[in-house]
Amino acid sequence: PVAGPACALSSVSCGGHHVWALTPAGEAWAWGANAFGMLGLGDRRSRTVPERVALPAPAAAAECGYAFTLVRLVGGSVLSCGFNRNGRCGVPAGDERATRSEDGD
């Protein structure tokens, strides 16, 4: 067993080596590999236990790709984090940043 959020989860998405889980209230938790910043925690340090992700609004959905994550917030905004090869995080291809980007509302 792994310590983590002591609450109900409404969804879980698994990427190549990372996981995001959402609570019914829209809180986001992430853990696993983080070499490209796909946990959305502002760094590249991997986590072996779930850590809460600070978001500007509650999460409605999260989907993990191989080394990136897309998060739809309540209200419709979309955040992305992780490896942006070929523009998969919604920012111009070639911008290989490991930070979150948000679409314009």
Image (tube, rainbow, N blue to C red):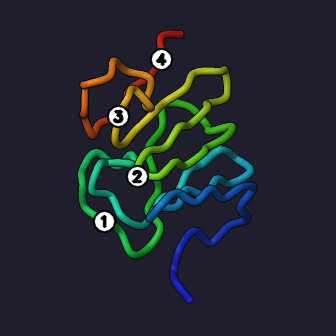
Q: Earlier in the sequence, mark 2 or mark 4?
A: 2
Extreme-bottom residue of the structure: 1
Please tell me how crowded label 2 is: few (under 14), some (14-19), or many (20+) other residues with Cα within 10 Å: many
Q: Is residue 77 left or right of residue 32?
A: right
Q: Quadrant of residue 76?
A: top right
The three-letter code of the residue at mark 3 reads Asn
The residue wearing badge 4 is 103
The residue wearing badge 3 is 84
Q: Earlier in the sequence, mark 2 or mark 3?
A: 2
The residue wearing badge 1 is 46
Q: Earlier in the sequence, mark 4 or mark 3?
A: 3
The three-letter code of the residue at mark 1 reads Ser
Q: Position of residue 81 (x, y in %)?
A: 40, 39
**How far apart are labels 4 and 3 at the CA level?**
14 Å
Instruction: Name the residue rendered at 71%, 61% in the picture.
Output: 9
Q: Position of residue 65 (x, y in %)?
A: 52, 48
